[in-house]
């Protein structure tokens, strides 16, 4: 497997038309606060948040839930995604308490959300880092064509609510809302001269998996990971 060099990743600032460039292998955390993407989603859409809890995991507090939703809405606007509207169900179905059959309960609720809520994307607050719960969400959502973003909560129900955190979620949402969106570009991928491109990109190449942005490691180190993931690989997109 060929490991590429650290990429140079471009975003656009909220008020500056010139690209903002992030580069270097020592950057360990993205801060996308008030950054616009290269091409943001421009259509109207509806989003919602589902909070799941149960067992030893408490429900996320109303204060944290409200703050999270407010900051997520703000991060969407900062990124240039201005036509998003939050759906708040009148029947209180945005909470799900797991009991004896968590997988079946998650499946039933997501199928209900797909039929009744009419949302374009769903953010799911999961109790901890259970791979089973995560897989149940993703499997059911994929089968019902419901884009989802998962966030892992602490045992106390606490979740990250900062604008910096929700801005990173918006990076994922922008790609899931449409196939025409573009978060970032890497300068080496678009270099016209072969001498300025990584050797693996100077020939006819099929890249099956490429992760150029990661909260923990900017290095491109996950080629083919989705085909043969390492045993220690965390499946959560965002975790606390």
Image (tube, grey):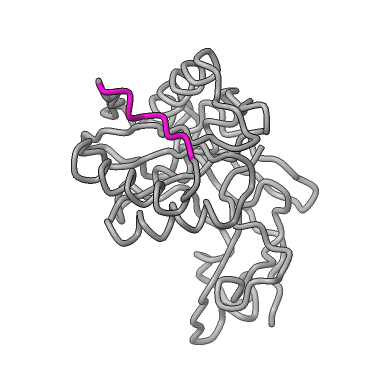
- Residue at horizontal 41%, vertical 34%? 50
Inspect the magenta stretch and tell me whether residue 95 lies in it: yes
| Range shown magenta | 91-98
Task: Work out whether 205 lies above or below 196.
Answer: below
- Residue at horizontal 32%, vertical 48%? 108
Residue 72 location (% of width, % of height): 45, 26
Instruction: Give the residue at the far top of this rendering.
Output: 63
- Residue at horizontal 46%, vertical 32%? 51
Q: Nearer the viewer, residue 217 or 203?
A: 217
Please tell me in which quadrant of the rendered image residue 219 appears.
bottom right
Q: Nearer the viewer, residue 220 or 55?
A: 55
Instruction: Name the quadrant of the N terminus.
Output: bottom right
Residue 125 location (% of width, % of height): 51, 36
Residue 204 location (% of width, % of height): 49, 86
Please tell me in which quadrant of the rendered image residue 220 appears.
bottom right
Please tell me in which quadrant of the rendered image residue 56 appears.
top right
On the picture, is 27 further left or further right than 22?
right
């Amino acid at each position: 497997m060929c490991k590429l060099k650290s990429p140079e990743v471009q975003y656009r600032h909220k008020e500056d038309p010139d690209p903002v460039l992030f580069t270097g292998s020592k950057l360990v955390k993205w801060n996308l606060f008030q950054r616009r993407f290269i091409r943001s989603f421009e259509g109207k859409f509806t989003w919602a948040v589902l909070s799941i809890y149960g067992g030893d995991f408490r429900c996320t507090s109303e204060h944290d839930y409200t703050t999270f939703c407010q900051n997520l809405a703000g991060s969407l606007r900062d990124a240039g995604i201005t036509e998003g509207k939050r759906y708040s169900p009148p029947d209180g179905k945005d909470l799900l308490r797991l009991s004896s059959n968590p997988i079946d309960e998650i499946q039933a609720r997501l199928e209900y959300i797909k039929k009744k809520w009419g949302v374009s994307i769903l953010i799911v607050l999961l109790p901890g880092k259970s791979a089973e719960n995560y897989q149940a969400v993703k499997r059911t959502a994929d089968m019902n064509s419901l884009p989802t973003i998962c966030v892992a909560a602490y045992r106390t129900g606490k979740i990250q609510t900062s604008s910096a955190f929700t801005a990173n979620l918006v990076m994922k949402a922008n790609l899931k809302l449409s196939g025409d969106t573009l978060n970032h570009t890497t300068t080496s991928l678009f270099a016209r001269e072969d001498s300025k491109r990584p050797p693996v990109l100077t020939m006819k190449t099929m890249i099956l998996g490429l992760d150029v942005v990661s909260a923990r490691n900017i290095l491109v180190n996950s080629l083919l990971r989705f085909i043969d993931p390492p045993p220690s690989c965390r499946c959560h997109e965002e975790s606390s």
